[in-house]
Image (cartoon, rainbow, N blue to C red):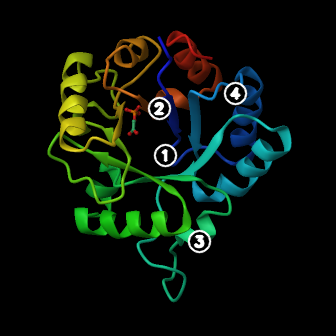
Amino acid sequence: MEQKELWFIANWKSNKNVSEALEWINTVGPRLHNNPNLKVVVCPQFTELAEVKKAVLINNYPIIVGSQDLSPFPEGSYTGEENAKEVKQFADLSILGHSERRKNFNETDQLVAEKVKQAIKVGIIPLVCIQNQNGLVPEGVKLVAYEPPDAIGTEHPDSPDNAQAVAKHLKEMRGDLKVLYGGGVSGETAAAFIKQEDIDGLLIGHHSLDAIEFIQIIDSCSVV
Ligand code: PGA
């Protein structure tokens, strides 16, 4: 059977300085084989993006660099914003609409849809996070992460069966979607999600911070 394409996305959230980020990259990078079906993505804070991208390029590591957000506006007078065109210098994917942003920064579906438009315009893959099977998936989005907020930051992920049911429902609504699961994933639970027919990968937060643990998660799914 042909191996399905699998995504393993490390969401570092608001953690790591430049030297910690580079140590992680130089630990994970050499341990990954070049496997076209394995998409490993790391999403640092904006302040680490340039150095992380440089390290990936110089060492030719099979790692995609992503951002955790981007501006809903193009370049211009938007103080403090990181516009998609400049983010694209370093990142090929952006996590958009994470529940921590919806909760702490009042992000709405409408705002997320604007960010998606900006990402698509410059060729950044928008990875949209939704909280349940009725979450809005803006037009043009091909990659979503189902992340039940109660599971995030805990050691209690959703059940693989339920995540599979949500993923299946989403794909029935939109045939061209890939669906990741995120929220409380660790080395103990990762493989049970990956085994589900409609789950195409994992978005991993606190258990991605340790480089060796992150590799072990990928390894536990037999795809390092
Ligand atoms: P967690 O976070 O793995 O720490 O639960 C996942 C996420 O919020 O993307």
In this rendering, position of residue 109 left or right of residue 196: left
Q: Secondary structure at mark 3?
A: helix
Alpha carbon distance from label 4 to label 3: 28 Å
Residue annotated with mark 3? 85
Q: Which residue is mark 4?
A: 28
Residue assigned mark 1: 13
Image quadrant of ligand 1 equals: top left
Residue 164: x percent and y percent? 24, 23
Q: Earlier in the sequence, mark 2 or mark 3?
A: 3
**Is label 3's Cβ within 8 Å of ligand 1?**
no
Pointer 3 or 1: first along the chain:
1
Q: How far across and how far down the image is residue 203, in percent?
A: 43, 34
Q: Which mark is residue 206?
A: 2
Helix, strand, or loop for circle 4? helix
Marks 2 and 1 sit apart, C-alpha to C-alpha, by 8 Å
- The residue at label 2 has a CB less than 8 Å from ligand 1: yes
Quadrant in which the C terminus appears: top right
Badge 3: residue crowd in 10 Å (few <14, some 14–19, many ≥20): some
Q: Is residue 95 above or below residue 2?
A: below
Mark 2 secondary-structure assignment: helix
Residue drawn where x is 40% and y is 28% of the image? 200
Mark 2 vs mark 4, CA separation in Å: 16 Å
Judge depth for marks 1 and 4 and give the one in front: 4
- Residue 13 position in % (x across, y down): 49, 46
Question: Disc 3 to disc 1, how far (Cα)?
Answer: 21 Å
Please name the amino acid that badge 3 sits on. Lys
Query: Of residues 87 and 174, which is closer to you in this image?
Result: 174
Residue at image coords 55%, 10%: 222
Q: Any atom of ligand 1 within 8 Å of the CB at mark 1?
A: yes
Q: Earlier in the sequence, mark 2 or mark 1?
A: 1
Q: Amino acid at mark 1?
A: Lys
How crowded pointer 1 is (Cα within 10 Å; few <14, some 14-19, many 20+) is rated as some
